[in-house]
Image (tube, rainbow, N blue to C red):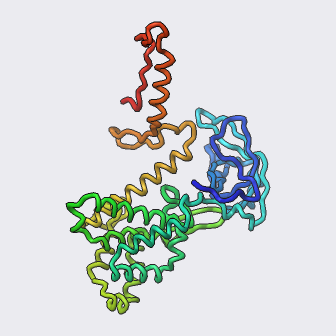
Amino acid sequence: MDTAAAPPYVRAALGFPEPGTQTVGVVCVRARTERTASTGSPYLVVTLGHRDGSATVKVWSQDLPLWADVQEGDALEVRLVAKAGNNGYPPEWTVQEFQRLPADHPVRDDLLPACPISYEELRARYDALRLLLTEPARVLLDVVMEHVGEEAYWRAPAAERMHHAVAPFGLVWHSIEVAEVAVATARAIPTYVAQLSIDALILGALLHDLGKIREYDVIPGVGIRRSVLAESRYHTTLGIEMVATAAAINAARLDAAGVPAWLIQHVYAVIESHHAQKEWGSPSAPSSREAWLLHLADQTSAKLAALTATLERATPMESEGWYRPAEPRSRPLQRFDLLEAQRTADADREVLRSPDTDEASPDDVITIILNAE
């Protein structure tokens, strides 16, 4: 992902903790949790981080007084030392020294990865999708954006951590991707494209996660957190409520523009069902072709973004299998550099080729097996 210009401070390197190494730099306290050890002694679990990564450290009872005034969102200058894990656990960072920094330190606003796509490109893609709508559908989109605040839509993240977890532009980045995938898929299947409502498809895609404006807060020094409202509400129902309120307030304008009632109802249905299952947060399953197509486009955008982000931050121990599914017959998703593997295999065969016969002997042949069962 793109990063902003170098900040006037050094971020602590929070990569995989190789025992014996150390790092010095600036971090934020993204979370702190009080816990009790098996011996009955209290300790803290503290998550330190910035836009380049996070690390969890433990603060044991003897050091707790030093951390008494350290709160979530505080900026710290730290010296971390990596040590081997106990009882077979992975290596971990330990805090050797730290100093609290001023409350207005810029690292507090430097917690989230930058969106890899510029505002100008996102705006051009959004406007291109808007132009595919009929005039009544454009009016409906504009009415909703005016009601929720277009700036809020553009500044919101699409998730707390799994996919498009950036702010600003996370929500609009994901929504544009969903719309583009849905439209491209519809166009790729001529049998059905004439039977689809492109208005419902694009409006549903651009508005399907609208409720995330209220579901997430971006907190300086902490990052993206679920809002208090999200404890009892989910973005599917929040999004319907936001669109319905905008439509009710602007009923006369929508009527004058010829916005059909069925289109508004269809947008509600697409938003409500875009996760497809109650267990995933949708009150109902998709009940139209547009709703099913949008659900699949949403899954495509979210899953590819989540997989990409995970592989980008994978540690050496996670370089191949980043996800171990619960289902016993499912296979872990793998990262295959197939072209590199083929190039390496060809090079190995060339080295092993006999200079006399120009052929490799049977004992010298190396078989490369990828993801063997």
> Which picture quadrant has residue 334?
top left
Residue found at x 37% / y 75%: 240
Q: Which quadrant does the C terminus fall into?
A: top left
Q: Residue 354: x percent and y percent?
A: 47, 10
Q: Residue at x 49, y 15 (%)?
A: 352
In this orientation, which residue lies closer to the viewer: 190 or 100? 190
| x then y, percent, for residue 58 | 67, 47
Question: Considering only vertical position in the picture, is 354 above or below 296?
Answer: above
User: In percent of the image, x 43 and y 81: which residue is there?
Assistant: 142
In the image, residue 301 lies at what x, y percent?
41, 57
Q: Is residue 272 visible?
A: yes
Q: Nearer the viewer, residue 333 or 123?
A: 123
Quarter of the image with the N terminus in it: bottom right
Q: Nearer the viewer, residue 329 or 183?
A: 183
Q: How far across and down, in percent of the image, does residue 267 sit?
A: 33, 74
Which residue sits at x=34%, y=79%? 137
Left of 42 or right of it: where is 282? left
User: In the picture provided, is 75 more to the left or to the right than 185?
Assistant: right
User: Which quadrant of the structure image shows residue 99?
Assistant: bottom right
Please indicate, yes or no, whether residue 233 appears anywhere in the rendered image. no
